[in-house]
Image (cartoon, rainbow, N blue to C red):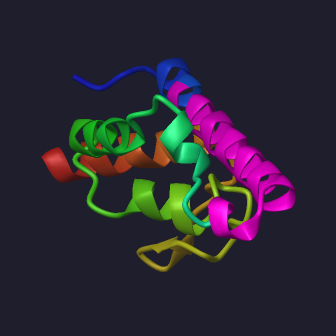
Amino acid sequence: MLINKQEFVDIINRLKDTDDTVVKVNKIFDDTIDSRISDSMNASCLMICHEDIVVDLLKKIFNDIDTLSWWLYECDYGRSFKMGDLKDNGVAVDLTTPDKLYDYLVDCYERNKE
């Protein structure tokens, strides 16, 4: 059973917010703590986050191998995605928002289950 679009978008936005917080905290460490100490500090140590588990679960739900991870990490939660970055059967796919990513994952899921 797939999750609905709003649930998916909420999860993606929470993952993005957590990632943004990690980046901000790491920047604070980098700017304020002696570099010898900050090298061993990492905001992700401070976050109670199970991002890998959540991403793996979403990949299993949508029977997705690479698209979700690529969109999250390589495209920085879609922020650096540009039209033409992903083509499906020669057609550019619009993945500029989590909503559009959801629609694409559902479409792929439906095509692959036949």
Q: Is residue 36 magenta?
A: yes
- Does residue 87 lie above or below 94 as drawn? below
Q: Nearer the viewer, residue 45 or 66?
A: 45
Question: Which residue is outermost to the right?
Answer: 31
Q: Nearer the viewer, residue 104 or 76?
A: 76
- Does residue 55 lie above or below 13 as drawn? below
Residue 38: x and y in percent read: 67, 60
**Left or right: 7, with 92 as reference point:** left
Q: Is residue 82 visible?
A: no
Quadrant holding the N terminus? top left
Prevailing SS of the magenta stretch: helix
Q: Residue at x 62, y 52 (%)?
A: 77
Q: Residue at x 53, y 72 (%)?
A: 86
Q: Residue at x 75, y 53 (%)?
A: 29
Q: Is residue 89 magenta?
A: no
Residue 61: x and y in percent read: 25, 35
Q: Quadrant of residue 97?
A: top right
Q: Which residues are magenta?
A: 11-38
